[in-house]
Amino acid sequence: MRAAVVHPELPFANRAKWENGIANSSGMLAGRGSAARLTEASGLATAINLEVCHAAVVPVPRIRPATLFGSGKVVEIGETIAALGAGVVIVDGSLSPIQQRNLERAWDCKVIDRTALILEIFGARARTREGKLQVELAALLYQRSRLVRSWTHLERQRGGFGFLGGPGETQIEADRRQIRDRIARLKRDLKNVVRTRSLHRAARQRVPYPVVALVGYTNAGKSTLFNRLTGADVDVKDQVFATLDPTMRGLVLPSRRRVILSDTVGFVSDLPHDLVAAFQATLEEVAEADLILHVRDISHPETAEQRQDVHDVLVELGLEEKVKSGLVEVLNKTDLLEEGERTRLLSAREPGRSYVAVSALTGYGLEPVLALIDAELLRGRRILSVKIDLTDGAAIAWLYSHGEVLKRADDERVAHIQVGLSPADAERFDRRRRKSHKEARHEDQIASEMG
């Protein structure tokens, strides 16, 4: 399908008015260039195989509540659309239901906003049952405030969520009560997902290994880095939102300790709030992680703005303290930098900031990444002096694989070990010892009763 992409360029005063009153988000962030935003919106469109035949930044001196654009611009854009034969127009911002309806009538084609486009991409990419439930919930929460006629009962012959139209999607009536009932069912199903994930996390804590989560802006190279570090074969594409469903693999660090590395969905500017809420179950993996690695595309012209977008989403997830204390940053795609830029990046060290420069594509800098993970997990480590029965080989092996043994002395029955453990591993070891002592007391009780 041929598509036209339009980015509304609003003055600051109108932008604030739009954000606070007429729409949820203007699609314009301070410090962001309109040209870069237009390029990103075009990339989002091509991610679902739309053919972008026209892309333009359109100045909007004053917002029109009925159509957003002025009447002259509406006519001008309509003539361009008709000449190019575009079947859909993507407005890179938020449209009210009234604005969407009026623009569709004026241009005689489908009109969607940024939120609908992102939901369409997620709907086409979700593979697991959990991912499909989450995207469907986000789509219905969005549709609930739209015209009822646009909902399609999810009875489609293709992926996505029907904002663009397509085979099997027309003339299917649905009312708000049906949407509300479906939302309620989806929320119940996702509660079961949360419960299942909690059980999985509890199982990992019993294993137990620290969890390291990769987060970052979409297309920053998280999955490529994940594959490089773990030897996995997660699908890697040069497109936005190539990864939706989280993937986990084991990873051995230079200290020989094992961790679990988690690859997560990428973030994007103005990520719809309903989508963040719907993906709460998946993103809990980030919240529960022992360490968060922020993978950045350091070659991108707006890498600083992308960094802020990721921080905003993490704050929305309740991780404000981790953001304030400073995330560990992996500056990816250094192979795309000029030699001088790369040299300056490697030589410039900011106090109190943990980061490493890499190229996941070429494999450059992978060893420093592993060393940084090791160092960060041991930051603020606890030094424990423990006595372990020599017959408990599993506990002794656990300490060697998860911590740094600083001193050891054995007598006939007991190993006296001084070991450095990360706070998370120290807590895990304490739980392990309490469980062992409880089982030992239980066995002694049974033996005394039998005796």
Image (cartoon, rainbow, N blue to C red):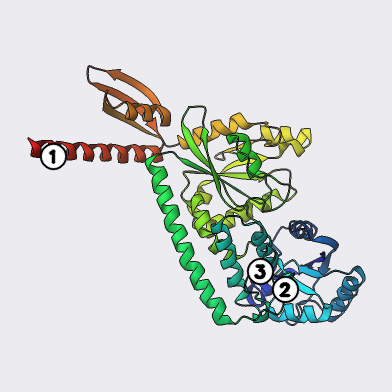
* Residue neighbourhood size for the residue with mark 1, other residues' Cα within 10 Å, grouped as few (<14), some (14–19), many (≥20): few
Q: Earlier in the sequence, mark 3 or mark 2?
A: 2
- CA–CA distance in space, label 3 to label 1: 65 Å
Which residue type does callout 1 highlight? Gln
* Residue neighbourhood size for the residue with mark 2, other residues' Cα within 10 Å, grouped as few (<14), some (14–19), many (≥20): some
- CA–CA distance in space, label 3 to label 2: 12 Å
Which of 204/320 is in front? 204
Q: Nearer the viewer, mark 1 or mark 2?
A: 1
Tell me if 46 is positioned left or right of 180 in this view: right
Q: Which residue is mark 2?
A: 14
Res 438 quadrant in image: top left
Instruction: Find residue 445 and name its label.
Output: 1
Q: Nearer the viewer, mark 3 or mark 2?
A: 3
Which of 374/202 is in front? 202
Horizontal and vertical percent position of residue 14: 72, 73
Element carrying mark 3: loop
Tell me if 328 is positioned left or right of 385 in this view: right
Task: Relative to 43, say whether 1 is above or below.
Answer: below
Horizontal and vertical percent position of residue 317: 51, 58
